[in-house]
Amino acid sequence: MQEGKLRFGVLCHGTSFKAWQARCLRQLLEIPGVEPALLIVDADSPPPQPPSLFRAAGNILSGRTTAWHLYARRMKGQLTSSRTVSMEQELAGVPRLECRTQLKGRWSHYFTDEDVERIRQHRLDFILRFAFEIIRGKVLDAAEYGVWSFHHGDPAHYRGGPACFWEVYDGAPLTGAILQRLTHRLDAGVILHQGTFGTDRGMKAYSLTCNKVTLGAASWPAHLCRQILSGNDARVRAGTPCRTTAPIRHDPSPWQSLRFLARCVRKELALKVRWLFREEQWNIGYAPIPIHKLLAKCEWPEVRWYRKLPRHQFLADPMATRFDGRVAIIAEHYDYRTRKGTLRTLALENGRPAGEPALAIEEPWHLAYPYLVHLGADLYCIPEGIGGDCLWAYRAREFPTAWERIGPLIDKTRIVDPTLFEHEGRWWLLGMRSGEYREQGYVELHGWYADSLMGPWQPHLCNPIKTDVRNSRPAGPPFYHAGKLYRPTQDCCGEYGSAVAINEVLTLSPTEFEERQVTRLTPHRRWPYSDGVHTLCPVEGGVIIDARRWIFIPHCFWGRLRALLFSSGSEYARSQRTKTVLAAAAAGGQSAAPAGQKVSP
């Protein structure tokens, strides 16, 4: 690697790429010092041909098109990640080298010695593989950091293809992906980066899952480049080749394709019935157990719940603190009639949330996750504000019901579940970026750091610092125990808000992040709210939590029935997002008022 520069090559079919590949390349081009130096074009790739009914009919008659290919053709319009994108302008002037490989054995393709030498002359730091078949031989060592290749699937369980299909077919709750450095052994690459995504359900499960996984993984080469440029290339150079005995999958047979479609129809009907008749209702409670006791995955003690709420309302995302000698809880109060969340306060009396929810903060947009921070004699609330255009902070003017807006902490950035804390002399902010969390489903954790609460905040070098649907999204304040830092997180595997995991943070610096899951907590089956849990907040020797139940809400039922009958299901599609996304759509994304405006009643 030249000082402060990275040169990369691309194994490709030309300057047209799939949308997820184009996203990957564009993110690389945005990094100062990273430049494309060579396009290694597959000379044997057939030129793109326009769709033809005659060609399709000929394939059917010749037996080359199965039920799977007909289904894949039908789903092509929904696979937005696979749409063709031209990068002719971005890659203009990049040298091209057309190569033909030689097939040896049944699967392996080898570059000629002459082509390998031509590639080496360009002094590449790494090569991205977006074309050619299974490549082996000297070309794997033609760049300093080798050849990088994506595998969309967990190699421990799924090899072959189609990518992301068999996870949906098997009903697996998770779909993995890896970026690997290819080695001379088949299916034994060195894993450079990996992530875990949730598998979708219903008629569009395959396209939704495939889009989510391929687009979500596209940022990983840029992630590695930023690490290398910072001087941290140990992960790229080292590593142990993975080993797998998973069976190699192929295109499904006609019978498997029909069975797959039948499963999708059944799940789609189940989802629509649930969407029509069931909605989530959250409530908050107090568990009299120190939060560090939960690290041992002990049994939940008896939770003291807040009183039963009207069906069209719920309380969630509770945060609690002692301020001026009082313990108060601030939580999201959501009303299905307005599809909007406000922040309200309650008291903790005799170890139980009590009192009428008093309005604390209200904005034209949806508010949730009211994260609390003490700084000197002041108390700040930094909530999630989907629909606003910034991450705002609010300072307690008359705690707990009078606040004034200050800031913003971060301008023109919407952050979901913002979690702030001090660690080793720095302020840290962890959360999900609004666009990524909607598109990819609660998997990408981003980080920022600053010398003071009010900033300026700098993005972490390796954003997104983590990609895992099981334990990325924040679920409450981090805490220390026995000198170690722990971070509560949401486990959104299967569905949003299903469980809480607690991770031990092993490394946290402006250039590195590493953590491991210690325990996973699910709601007790005897709770009145036993269908989910997604927030933990320590207070007064115990933990404030929220939990969910699924109930029938007449207001939602009649609105959705009308949408189903008269709106061609558009309301159904919108309702599959989380409640915060619905609130943002209803609020219309109004801009925020000037800093310092009083927002209390």
Image (spheres, rainbow, N blue to C red):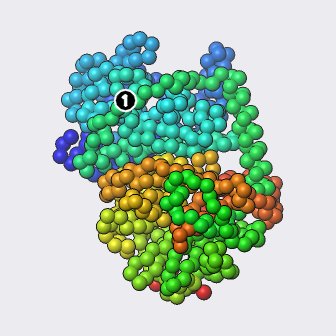
Q: What residue sits right under mark 1 in the picture?
A: 241
Q: Position of residue 449 (x, y in %)?
A: 35, 64
Callout 1: SS? loop
Q: Name the residue rendered at 33%, 47% in the picture.
A: 29
Q: Position of residue 499 (x, y in %)?
A: 60, 53
Judge the density around disc 1: few (<14), some (14-19), many (≥20) Cα neighbours within 10 Å: some
Asked if residue 490 shows in the view, the reply is no
> Where does the C terminus fall, quadrant-wise?
bottom right
Q: Name the residue rendered at 48%, 65% in the picture.
A: 477
Name the quadrant containing residue 77: top right
Q: Position of residue 8 (x, y in %)?
A: 29, 38
Q: Position of residue 35 (x, y in %)?
A: 28, 44
Nearest the eye: 461 or 99 = 461
Vertical comparison of 418 with 597: above or below:
above
Name the quadrant containing residue 411: bottom left
Q: Name the residue rendered at 73%, 43% in the picture.
A: 268
Tell me: 553 left or right of 454: right
Q: Name the residue rendered at 39%, 14% in the picture.
A: 103
Asked if residue 102 shows in the view, the reply is yes
Tell me: 257 left or right of 216: right
Nearest the eye: 480 or 408 = 480
Nearest the eye: 524 or 560 = 524
Total numbered badges shown on the rendered structure: 1
> Where does the N terminus fall, quadrant-wise?
top left
Could you tell me the amino acid type at mark 1?
Answer: Pro
